[in-house]
Amino acid sequence: MEKQPKLAPFSMHLRVDDFLPADESEKERLVVMRESVGFWKDGVRRLTANPIAMVSLGVLLVVFVIAFIVPVFYPYTYEWQIRGSENLFPMQYSQTEKDIMASGGNVFPHILGTDNLGRDFAIRVMIGARISLTVGMVAAALILLVGSVYGAVSGYFGGWVDMIMMRIVDIIYTIPDILIIILLSVTLKAPLKALADSSRSFAWINTFGVGLICIFIVFTMLYWVGMARLVRGQVLQLKEMEYVTAARALGASHWRIISKHLLSNSIGLLIITTTLQIPSSIFTESILSFIGMGVAAPLPSLGSLAKMGLDGLQSYPYRIFIPAVFIAVIILAFNLLGDGLRDAFDPKLKK
């Protein structure tokens, strides 16, 4: 093809060569080198590339195995009192157990010793970690459910609805949670006890204790406000998007828009916030159990074990240090994992 003459500067004429189909070399230069990936795949890839988050996840998996799987095969139970085995040090045997071993019998060692009632301390730490983890996850789930729905409704409708709902949130922020737990424990102790004694369906109340039930009630009543504010802010941005306008034009109901378009597109924020809420719930439960407002004896939690270890701090310091280390490790691992999830799934932090 004949080469087109060069045009003068500021010429209004067009070059014919500029409108010819691109050849293979030009097409290759326009190819995007990075593979296109979805939101979840990209988030998982970024999370696995974060060594601190992955180590934290590994630590939490080990803690979950210790708390939920090992007790199934452990030869002792948390309430089993072995007479003559009170206040044993780690890997120490009582005289009765030594006699059994001398006669050819097998006795499983007390890995962390026993407490003042002859109960194996290792299994109590395992069950205590299980209770603390369960409380943290259940409380986080309740906070997620209440806070996400409340915040989404407030942000979606806006106007006077949003103003009233957010003023309620401001009022709840001022309520002292510890005081409410104490008041509920005193107020609900008698009716819950009567309900548990009168019906087999509610016998589990005696197992877990009124204090733990009150903790769940307070978490549901008070601790969801932070989640609600975060979700509201996210919904205020998302409801102006084109797909929400299209859903309205197609006649979608308010609940469908909230659940299918707003909350589903806020799932990254929900996961991150829920993960960071778990250590906060565990810490609150540990403090309440430490002051005697948590689970009912003989069921242990890490907070109640630390309280019992405080009485023998000079003679048996490991009894308070081991539960305290478990609490610290669990809270630190969840916080570091939450930071990793935030870095992986927050689009604003993508590089």
Image: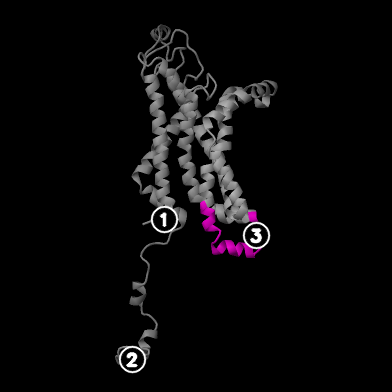
Q: Residue at x 60, y 23 (%)?
A: 186
In front of the other: 1 or 228: 228
- Amino acid type assigned to the residue bearing label 3 in the image: Ala
Which circle's residue, 2 or 1, is located before the other in the chain?
2
Q: Which residues are magenta?
A: 233-254
Apparent side of residue 77 relative to residue 95 in the rendered image (left or right): right
Residue at 48% x, 39% y is 277
- SS of the residue at dot 2? loop
Q: Which residue is mark 3?
A: 252
Q: Under tag 1, what secondary structure?
A: helix
- From the top left corner, tell me how far across and down residue 16 is, in percent: 37, 89
Tell me the quadrant of the picture where the N terminus can be found: bottom left
Q: Residues within 10 Å of mark 3 (few under 14, many from 20)?
A: some
Q: Going 52% across and 29% down the picture, which residue do you hit?
A: 178
The mark that comes first in sequence, 1 or 3, is 3
Name which residue type carries label 1. Lys
**Tag on residue 348?**
1
Foreground residue among 163 and 122: 163
Q: Quadrant of residue 325?
A: top left
Tell me: residue 279, above or below residue 12. Answer: above
Numbered circle sitting on residue 1: 2
> Which image quadrant: the C terminus?
bottom left
Question: Disc 2 and disc 1: Cα gap in Å?
Answer: 50 Å
- Choose mark 2 or mark 3, whichever is in front: 3
Main secondary structure type of the part rendered in magenta: helix
Q: CA distance from mark 1 to mark 3?
A: 29 Å
